[in-house]
Amino acid sequence: MKKVVRGFYSIAYSVKLCRPDVIAAYPITPQTEIVENLAKMYADGELGNCEYVTAESEFGAASILVGASATGARTFTATCSQGLILMSEVLINAAGMRLPIVLVNTNRALSAPLSIWNDHQDSMILRDAGLMQIYVETNQEAHDMVPVAFKVAENPKVMLPFMINMDGYKLTHAYEPIDLLDQEVVDSFLPPYDPPVYMTTKNPLTFGCYAPPNYYAEFRVVLQNAMERAEKELEKAYKEWAEITGRDWGGHVVTEGVEDAELIAIAMGSLTGMVRNVVSELRNQGKKVGLLKIRTFRPFPAKEIKEILKDVEKILVFERAVSFGYEGPVGMEVKSACFGLTPEFYSFAVGLGGRDVPGEEVMKIINEVYDGKVKQGFHFGTVKPFEEVVV
Amino acid sequence: MVMKITLGGVSKPHSSKTMKTGDWGTEYPVVDEEKCTACKTCEYLCPDACIVVVEKEDGKKVAVPDYDYCKGCGVCFSVCPAGAIKMELKEIYKLEVC
Amino acid sequence: MINILVEVRFHGRGGQGVVTAADILAVAGFKDGYHTLSFPTFGAEKRGTPVASFLRLSDKPIVSRDEIYYPDYVVVMDPTVIGPVKVEAGLKPEGKLIANYPKGSEDLKRAMGVDFEVLTINATKMAMEHLGRPITNTAMVGAFVGATNVIKLESLVETINEWFTSKELAEKNLKLVEEAYNYMREVCGW
């Protein structure tokens, strides 16, 4: 049933259909309406036997989910920016304990200076945490990816936390028509969670045991292997989702017009739609440009990306974060995936801290790179003139 | 204009004083000095420290709103035990359509 | 190809329902068969700060999520943001500015020094009469629908009925919508 709803609600609704057992969240800023909506559903008795726990911090929320997940519960939380960073210690543990917690991160910038607005700095910092990470372009995609996230996270071959990244404000606060899923569809796609190992009061266990140097490396190998399996399992889940719902969001990456492209623009998240628009406009003008949308960021689909980029002359990455002291994180990954290829490489950090990225800016950047007017390497998008002072 | 970016995002105190928020509200509080008992309830509860009891020249103490910063929330009006504060609609909203 | 694309920008202050206005029209527009998208932009999250929100209506799915720089319509919920905020920025020459401005359209045109179509309504007064509170969003969506013919009144009425969970509040807002709508029809001579 298609309905105009807010981005937050589309996620909460989808989570409800996944029949979670435990939801824990810190209810104050930087929290989102996702858990606010879920709290209301819980209060209205719509979440069945689900426990909804209000935590004293994001650290607490994630810790509650680690405990719950270890008992075999299907777990969910949502957070963003500082909240995600506060959760990070626990989430890294959850990955090591192989607990399939699903969280939605509504991407926002990090302090300082204080910002509540959208960019990808928060999730990029968790790049190496052992969480699966995908970035969605629309609220419909976000709505659809929640069951996929549970399915892959809880897959016995995977058993890893899953983070869905959706752009704060740009998606979360937007009202748009969403084809809300039916319970039967989700039930047919997502089986109940069948944990390979779980503890009870009668069967106490230690999760994340002590691993001295003669054990630790092997645990890490196992984690890396799980991520590699996750790449295949996620691909399968994407396909199965497309078959069941008829909505095909593509695989780890989605391309448009890359076959004959001299320049391929790379984007993630809500900016992709805009880049797609500009690319198709430029193609109509006869320019050989293409789009590569990266959906899965961890596990990183490096081979696929290299295959797509193998003959292209110029790569242009639209970044939403910066790895200070080097360049944009997505560009770094793309470059390392392209090892051995020799295209020109450009990356632009745009929309930092919620700065709007108008179509004109995207058009200007692509044109300038296409026409060879910019130096190779990393750049910032629109920056106003400024001077540095002490105070 | 070239913006100034301070080291560490440091700013000096009282920067909020340059931001006059008095035009934000639709209504503003008016104190009836006869009824005001200078009990300071409004002063304690104003979320923006915008109403303060002061001593006038004749020695009488009354609550005085700071219209430069008052956002017209009406908390003072709600809490005044003496009923000495009322909220009035600003002139700009009162005019009839020509 | 996109045949229809209507872009509307809303200005006002936090607490007046600027964001909700765009959202209500996104729901109402969808009932009329449009693809719709509404989203806000925030300053500090405080009651009273100038806020803007955006609405796109199209016959095709909407993929652009950037802010609206060249609106077809601008709706201003509060007279006091005119000046501090350049509400008319980028308004298309054939566009309309619909403002809650009690002194009337001629006065506003003079004050802003513009010559595109300016329509005014005393929405604060109407809101105070019907709701007892200066929340002008429902009056202004009524005025928008009355002044533009983009969305049907019936769709808006249906949306308002669904939006407010309290029946009493819905009825009060409906009266407000209808009064603003009728007022604008009269002003526009429709």
Image: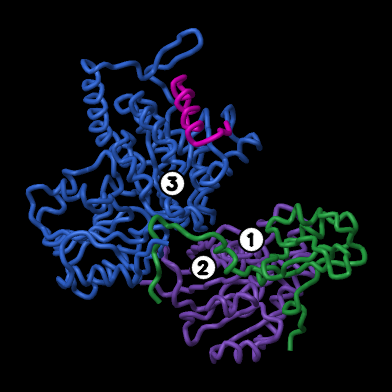
Neighbour tally class for label 1: few under 14, some 14-19, many 20 plus, Cα within 10 Å? some
The amino acid beneath tag 2 is: Leu
The amino acid beneath tag 3 is: Ser
Please name whichever residue, A130 or A41, is drawn nearer the observer in this view of the structure.
Answer: A130
Could you tell me if the residues under marks 2 and 3 are in contact, i.e. CB atoms within 8 Å?
no
Please name whichever residue, A355 or B67, is drawn nearer the observer in this view of the structure.
Answer: B67
Disc number for residue A213:
none
Residue marked by disc 2: C55
Left or right: A37 in relation to A246:
right
Residue marked by disc 3: A81
Left or right: A20 in relation to B58:
left
Element assignment for label 1: loop
Subunit ID for the residue under disc 1: C
Left or right: A136 in relation to C109:
left
Which residue is pictured at 61% across the width and 35% down the height?
A: A42
Indicate the chain coloured purple by its letter: C
Q: Are marks 2 and 1 on the same chain?
A: yes
Q: Is residue C184 visible?
A: no
Residue marked by disc 1: C47
Indicate the chain coloured green by its letter: B
Rendering colour (chain A): blue
Subunit ID for the residue under disc 3: A
Element assignment for label 3: helix
Task: Measure the alpha-carbon separation of dots 2 and 1.
Answer: 22 Å
The magenta segment: A53-76
Which residue is pictured at 16% across the width and 46% down the height?
A: A337
Residue C98 image offset from top left, x and y in percent: 61, 79
Residue A277 image offset from top left, x and y in percent: 32, 66
Task: Measure the alpha-carbon separation of dots 3 and 1.
Answer: 23 Å
Left or right: A16 in relation to B91:
left
Neighbour tally class for label 3: few under 14, some 14-19, many 20 plus, Cα within 10 Å? many
Subunit ID for the residue under disc 2: C
